[in-house]
Image (cartoon, grey):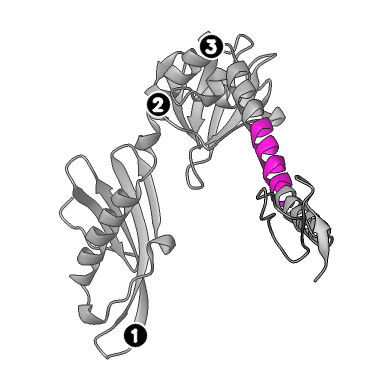
Amino acid sequence: MALIKCSECGKEISDKATTCPNCGCPVLHNNLPTQSLQKTSKQGNKKHGCLIPMLVIFILFGIGLAVGVLDIMENPDKYDSSRISAKFIDVSPEEGKKIDSILRECGIEKLKSFEHDELLDGMHSDEETGYRLAINDDVKNIILYLNKDKSVYSLKYSVYDLYIDNIVTATIQDYTFTTKEASNLMIKCEEKVKSILKSPSTAKFPSILNWGFQKEKNIVTVQGYVDAQNGFGAEIRSMFQFIINTDDDTIQSFIFDNQEMITGK
């Protein structure tokens, strides 16, 4: 055991002591400061290593948030859920309201896309612009023509006019089906087909994706096929078509294998 002097009071103490028995001052041994500093340095490096990625993420988040807020401030119509056209094309608030009003009168509340088509430009007059609109993947053949002042010249769905000569002539619902409407029609037609089959229990109809549906206001045409056993037990495929008046829910025509099944017209 060796003696060393206390750094605080100067008294001689054992080099094995951890504190001075005279004044209580902690004793720093030769090997402790270096180890302590190394440990502290490593801990500091670990803390900084964790903080740097977090700081980068925070900065990027702040930049993204600032850009989003700035875009909302500069283009409020783009983020206004009550707006339709202003989300897609450059129009003044007043121009956008007039376009949206006509779209809503024609039954269009939301759009998936609203794209300018140069091939449609000038169809009816100079400086007229044409646009292709889509509500979803199924209802997408909507054509809008805007005059030079961004007023609506006409709105069509497929070959049907929805708006022309400043008059709403129909709505998009007059020519399209909801999933529920199509399902109900399919069930109605399946039951009617089964009623004339030799072996209705063997009837197999395709999925709704393989049926054909067409609507012109209150007149609906439905086409499909059925696989079923005939009177000899052989499975055959038969084609059918229905024409239904949805106003009174009556079947006006039922053609099965090219034979009209509705009589007494």
Label 3 or label 1, whichever lies nearer to me, is: 3
In the image, is 140 to the left or to the right of 40? left
Q: Position of residue 26 (x, y in %)?
A: 70, 52
Q: Residue at x 74, y 50 (%)?
A: 44
Q: Residues within 10 Å of mark 2 (few under 14, many from 20)?
A: many
Q: Is residue 260 visible?
A: yes
Amino acid at dot 2:
Cys
Q: Is residue 58 magenta?
A: yes
CA distance separating discs 3 and 1: 63 Å
In the image, is 216 to the left or to the right of 47? left
Q: Is residue 198 visible?
A: no
Q: Which residue is mark 3?
A: 93
In the image, is 9 to the left or to the right of 73? right
Amino acid at dot 3:
Pro
| 3 and 1 marks in contact (CB < 8 Å) | no
| Highlighted magenta segment, given as a residue range | 49-64
Label 2 or label 1, whichever lies nearer to me, is: 2
Q: Residue at x 79, y 48 (%)?
A: 10
Q: Which residue is mark 1?
A: 235
Sequence-first tag of 3 and 2: 3
Q: Quadrant of the N terminus?
A: bottom right
Q: Is residue 137 above or below residue 186?
A: above
Q: Residue at x 69, y 35 (%)?
A: 59
Label 3 or label 2, whichever lies nearer to me, is: 3
Q: Residues within 10 Å of mark 3 (few under 14, many from 20)?
A: few
